[in-house]
Amino acid sequence: MAAVVFVLVALVVLALLASVHRYVWRRFVGDTTAPGSTLRKVGTVAAFVLPLLSLGAMTSGRIGAPFWLQQVLAWPGFLWLACLMYLTLALLVGEVVRPLLTRVLARRDATAAARATAGTGTSGTAVDGTLAATTSGTRPRTEELVPAGRSCPSTSADPAPATAPAAEPEAEAVRDTEAAPAEPEPAEADPAAPATATAPGLAHPSRRLFVSRVVGGAAAAAGLATVGYGTANVLRGPSVKRITVPLAKLPRAAHGFRIAVVSDIHIGPILGRAHTRRIVDTINSTSPDLIAVVGDLVDGSVADLGSAAEPLAGLRARHGSFFVTGNHEYFSGAEQWVNHVRELGLIPLENARVEMGGFDLAGVNDIAGETEGQGPDFVRALGDRDRGRAAVLLAHQPVVIHDAVEHGVDLQLSGHTHGGQLWPGNYLAELANPTVAGLEQYGDTQLFVSRGAGAWGPPVRVGAPADITVVELASRQA
């Protein structure tokens, strides 16, 4: 049954991706390029290649592809997912602008046509049956309409009877027209002249094509600029935040105890050793009393990423560095990573607790460990402790807050949400998590959720900057 559900979900996701790519191709390529043109061919090829790169980036690690291939696919594949998201959002905004711009241009063209007509005159037939065409708005000279060999009637002569036949002058006018020399070829149109005055036969982009190109260009600029900004946010590393959390049971001696909280580092095919080094240097610059690494450290095996994680051995804190697993550790070989971080000097808390000066520090495994029989065990971590002491819990996912409340935890430190990572992803994250980022109160327990120091999937953050937070514990007795 689970396999059937997985297949159905996969098919729905693939169908959605295909539909979105089709829409993006239509707006950026189909509506703005000529059939058979080089640009259309390039755009069509890209519309097939880019989603294949994205699928490869998402699946290569899971199927055990060589690490070098994962790295090759990761940057273009994951970046394209971010581009696809923001290009689509920009195009949807463009769907509102498109009809408005079309109306504005239509009114402008109509106004220009009306002015051109008023300035040059129109062609018509006089009431007496003779041609009355003008190009300057003045009445034609009479002799231009009189057949050769006839004299011009006096302006004082009586007008012709209403019953006079009109065929004869018309016929003679036609003969004069046939005898007249052919008009010269029209000169090349002035590009500055209005479209309504352009000779018929000269090709011009249609209003629809013009609107499609303007809206598509603006959407491309907005979407790509957003992705560029979000990528720069990740590559320059996390910033440091500081908050103070008062705990009722914390003794005066522990007042001002500082915990550097870092989550979701996500060492992987994109963010490697240099990323780890930036984070270590940032944490050490805060001179914390204790360091808490609350899950999702890696996206890959120890064999592939062990060297990228080595800078973690340089973490420095007076009371040590502690680690709990996240869901991605169980995708990457949790047992191997627990052993590896222990070798690097971190202390794993696998459903375990240690006593610090003035409070208990506990840690539980991530929920994803339940598939391996190694999920969170609150009884083992907290069941036999002295509830008169303050308790700080490290748990990767915020959703276990209700278990923390039940077991008398004073402060839970979590990550997992990335703060949404890509706006408007924060609204989706709110549907699955009690708190997406920051500090909130649940009964007698406070929950702090970090936005994380790295990024999963696209190395892009928009509206959810990466952070490392120094949590300073405050005693109400102080």
Image (cartoon, grey):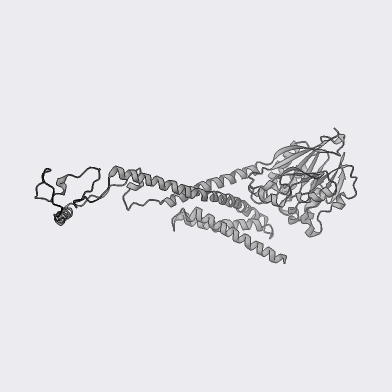
Q: How many marks?
A: 0
**Residue positioned most to the top:** 478
**Residue 47 x/y as whole percent:** 54, 57
Q: Would residue 432 be found to the left or right of residue 42 on screen?
A: right
In the image: residue 232, left or right of residue 309: left
Image quadrant in which you'd find residue 252: top right
Q: In the image, is residue 212 above or below residue 471?
A: below
Residue 350 screen position, x and y as percent:
83, 51
Report the residue at 81% width, 55% height from top: 375
Of residue 192 and residue 477, the one placed in the foreground of this image is 477
Residue 126 percent across, percent down from the top left: 21, 50
Q: Is residue 190 visible?
A: no
Q: Quadrant of residue 451?
A: top right
209 to the left or right of 408: left
Q: Position of residue 393 (x, y in %)?
A: 82, 46
Q: Does residue 145 show up?
A: yes
The residue at 81%/34% (across/down) is 256
Q: Quadrant of the C terminus?
A: top right
User: For this rendering, which residue is in front, 361 or 49?
Assistant: 361
| Position of 358 relative to 6 (above/below) | above
**Quarter of the figure that contains the N terminus:** bottom right
